[in-house]
Image: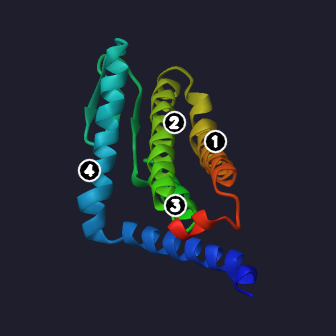
């Protein structure tokens, strides 16, 4: 009987984690204490990476721009990858796998999503400088879909890894 409701319990936990965590993002203290500093840090990391390759960019708060040329992007709260990371973590956290495997999955997946998001921000800066006509398409459609697809593929890969390690019905489910 319990087996029957296992999928529903997972979906309910995923939904509650997603809605609860997303709701936290609109709390002013969370925005000021986490989201905004995280976003500014993301811009600083983009600046550092690009300047390693001699791009000559500067960061000013959440704005990334070329120091001696036109082209800039402002990284807003919806463009920092946090929402996708929340969805990804919410998909793994209630999964019936050992806690260590869930932590490894969440940390590794969030890191991969954020690395791709760095590529996204950097590519958008170059589009703003060299191909403004393509900027909106890549910003509003391509990268949003691609980062979400990345999260889905990462989750499916993690799920496949877990299914091979701990098939349903084994005693390892008790370790979760």
Residue at far front of view: 171
Q: Earlier in the sequence, mark 3 or mark 2?
A: 3
Furthest toward the top, the residue is 54
Label 1 residue SS:
helix
- Whole-number angstrom distance, CA of label 3 to CA of label 1: 29 Å
Q: Could you tell which of marks 1 and 2 lies nearer the N-terminus?
A: 2
Residue at 47%, 44% (x, y): give it: 108
- Of the numbered discs in the image, which one, if any, rests on residue 146? 1
Marks 1 and 2 sit apart, C-alpha to C-alpha, by: 9 Å
Check whether the beta carbons of the residues at disc 3 and disc 4 lie within 8 A of each other: no
Q: Marks 4/2: CA distance?
A: 19 Å
Labelled pair 3, 2 in contact (Cβ < 8 Å): no
User: What SS does tag 3 mark?
Assistant: loop
Q: Nearer the viewer, mark 4 or mark 2?
A: 2
Per the model, the C-alpha gap separating discs 1 and 4 is 25 Å
Q: Which residue is mark 4?
A: 37
Q: Position of residue 165 (x, y in %)?
A: 64, 51
């Amino acid at each position: 009987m319990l087996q029957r409701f296992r999928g529903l319990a997972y979906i309910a936990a995923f939904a509650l984690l997603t809605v609860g965590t997303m709701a936290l993002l609109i709390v002013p203290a969370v925005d000021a204490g986490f989201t905004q500093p995280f976003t500014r840090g993301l811009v600083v990391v983009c600046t550092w990476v690009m300047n390693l390759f001699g791009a000559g960019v500067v960061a000013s708060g959440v704005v990334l721009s070329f120091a001696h040329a036109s082209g800039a992007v402002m990284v807003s709260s919806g463009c920092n990858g946090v929402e996708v990371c929340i969805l990804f973590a919410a998909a793994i956290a209630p999964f019936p796998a050992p806690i260590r495997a869930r932590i490894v999955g969440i940390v590794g997946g969030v890191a991969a999503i954020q690395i791709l998001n760095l590529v996204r921000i950097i590519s958008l800066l170059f589009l703003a400088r060299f191909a403004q006509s393509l900027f909106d398409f890549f910003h509003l459609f391509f990268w949003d879909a691609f980062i979400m697809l990345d999260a889905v593929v990462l989750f499916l890969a993690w799920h496949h890894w877990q299914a091979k390690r701990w098939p349903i019905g084994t005693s390892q489910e008790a370790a979760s």
